[in-house]
Image (cartoon, rainbow, N blue to C red):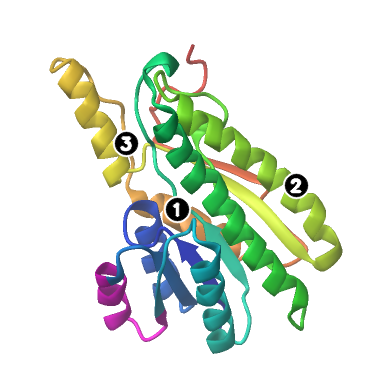
């Protein structure tokens, strides 16, 4: 049975992806802060392991990774997903503490998870594995008022490229999925902010979050000699191509 750790597994894209991998027969380590939600998922799936912790805490994260790898007999994949949007405002209205919080979760947290997965994949026998980073369309074309989130997601693209290079010697592949307007709590919150500013606003098209989750599964199930380096999955009519 193949194994994967999924961060941010209690909601949104992370939870949807966990459900897809569990249904596909993978052994899944669920990382998030909400222990009660992870416990509920684990109760209904024998192949799920709840690993409640904060992705920004390297010590508890190491404990989680070590315990899951010991139980699963290794680690085949990581879906490096946990993240937050942060304040929606121009830069002069953003508190430094709010910026630090977004960078802490979206960059530091993903760095910690990638570091632990890389170390496990490098030392296990047989060596190797796959790291899939959750980027964003904001890693390419940002939304207005998204300075914190956009900065963090550009950093993740650099992380993906560096991991791809550093992993070659150890059979560790790394790819990035950039998801646009999957129906999650984050997108619903963004839509609520838009409507609060303009009740007459037309909301952008969205897609079922399961489609994003199935795309992650496709990336994870590639054979070792193949890799999806970057994948963009978005609502078909979303104004991404050609938007100013």
CA separation, marks 1 and 3?
20 Å
Q: Nearer the viewer, mark 2 or mark 3?
A: 2
Q: Is residue 225 above or below residue 166?
A: below
Q: Earlier in the sequence, mark 1 or mark 3?
A: 1
In the rendered image, is residue 223 in sight?
A: no
Q: Residue at x 53, y 60 (%)?
A: 79
Q: Is residue 244 above or below residue 82?
A: above
Q: Circle 2 — which element?
A: helix
183 on left or right of 161: left
Mark 2 is surrounded, within 10 Å at the Cα level, by few (under 14), some (14 to 19) or many (20 or more) other residues, namely few
Q: Circle 1 — which element?
A: loop
33 on left or right of 162: left
Q: Residue at x 49, y 56 (%)?
A: 56
Q: Residue at x 74, y 63 (%)?
A: 172
Q: Residue at x 45, y 53 (%)?
A: 82
In the rendered image, is residue 220 in sight?
A: yes
Which percent across, then down, holds residue 192? 20, 30
Residue 8 tag number: none
Residue 162 tag number: 2
**124 falls in the magenta region:** no
Q: Earlier in the sequence, mark 1 or mark 2?
A: 1
**Residue at image mark 3:** 206
**43 falls in the magenta region:** yes
**Which residue is at the far left?**
199
**Residue at image mark 1:** 82
Mark 1 is surrounded, within 10 Å at the Cα level, by few (under 14), some (14 to 19) or many (20 or more) other residues, namely many
Q: Which residues are magenta?
A: 36-48
CA separation, marks 2 and 3?
31 Å
24 on left or right of 135: left
């Amino acid at each position: 049975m193949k194994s994967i750790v999924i961060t941010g597994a209690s909601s949104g894209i992370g939870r949807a992806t966990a459900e897809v991998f569990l249904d596909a027969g993978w052994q899944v380590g669920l990382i998030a802060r909400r222990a009660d939600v992870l416990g509920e998922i684990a109760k209904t799936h024998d192949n799920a392991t709840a690993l409640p912790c904060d992705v920004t805490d390297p010590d508890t994260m190491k404990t989680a990774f070590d315990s899951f790898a010991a139980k699963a007999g290794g680690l085949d994949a990581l879906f490096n997903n946990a993240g937050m949007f942060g304040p929606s405002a121009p830069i002069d209205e953003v508190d430094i503490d709010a910026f630090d919080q977004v960078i802490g979760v979206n960059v530091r947290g993903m760095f910690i998870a990638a570091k632990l997965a890389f170390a496990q994949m490098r030392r296990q026998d047989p060596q190797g594995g796959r790291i899939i980073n959750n980027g964003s369309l904001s890693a390419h074309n940002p939304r207005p008022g998204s300075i914190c989130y956009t900065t963090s997601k550009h950093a993740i693209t650099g992380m993906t490229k560096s991991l791809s290079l550093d992993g070659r010697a150890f059979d560790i592949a790394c790819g990035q999925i950039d998801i646009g307007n999957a129906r999650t709590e984050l997108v619903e919150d963004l839509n609520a902010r838009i409507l609060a500013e303009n009740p007459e606003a037309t909301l952008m098209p969205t897609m079922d979050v399961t489609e994003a989750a199935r795309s992650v599964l496709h990336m994870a199930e590639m054979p070792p000699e193949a890799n999806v380096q970057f994948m963009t999955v978005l609502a078909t009519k979303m104004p991404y191509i050609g938007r100013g």
